[in-house]
Amino acid sequence: MARTFWVIGCVFGFLGVAAGAFGAHALRGHLSPDLLAVFETAARYQMYHALALLFASRTAARGGGRAAGWLFAGGITVFSGSLYLLALTGIRWLGAITPIGGLALLAGWLMLARAGWTRDAVRDPDR
């Protein structure tokens, strides 16, 4: 599972950089400032949570973090994906599913904390 989350995190990171560059260079002038801000939010949150997936990978390698990894992967897909689609298509109802992805991201952080707290998933240098 650790390798899976590591690879998924790297792919999401790669795509987040590509999306950010695409938004900054190709979409400026084609989208309204409001929709461009939506696109940039999607790329920013994708990058934050791609890094979180790397943390989940390291935690999963030590016996915890599976739930966190899947919640981050699903949350990125739903949260950022719905915002990308909203920005590119202008279909407003897509914004209604964005909070589902946000809840998955929040739950991912809670599960990552739980994994670190309840298992020897995070090494304590003072031990």
Image: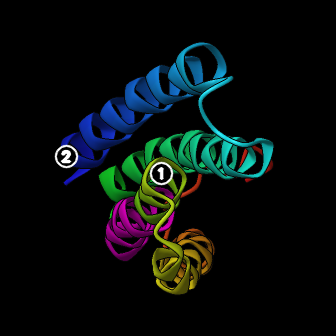
Residue receiving disc 1: 84
Looking at the picture, how far across and down is residue 83, in whole percent?
53, 60
Q: Is residue 50 magenta?
A: no
**First to last magenta residue range:** 65-80
The reply to whether residue 43 is visible in this rendering is yes
- 34 to the left or right of 61: right
Q: Looking at the magenta stretch, what is its main secondary structure?
A: helix
Residue 19 drawn above or below residue 95: above
Please give the name of the residue rendered at 53% of the width and 46% of the height, measured from the top-left corner.
46
Between residue 68 and residue 123, name the one nearer to us: 68
- 91 to the left or right of 33: left
Figure quadrant of the N terminus: bottom left
Looking at the picture, how far across and down is residue 84, in whole percent?
47, 51
Please give the name of the residue rendered at 75% of the width and 46% of the height, measured from the top-left corner.
37
Q: Label 2 vs label 1: CA separation?
A: 24 Å
Residue receiving disc 2: 4
Looking at the picture, how far across and down is residue 105, in whole percent?
55, 71
| Kind of residue at badge 2 | Thr
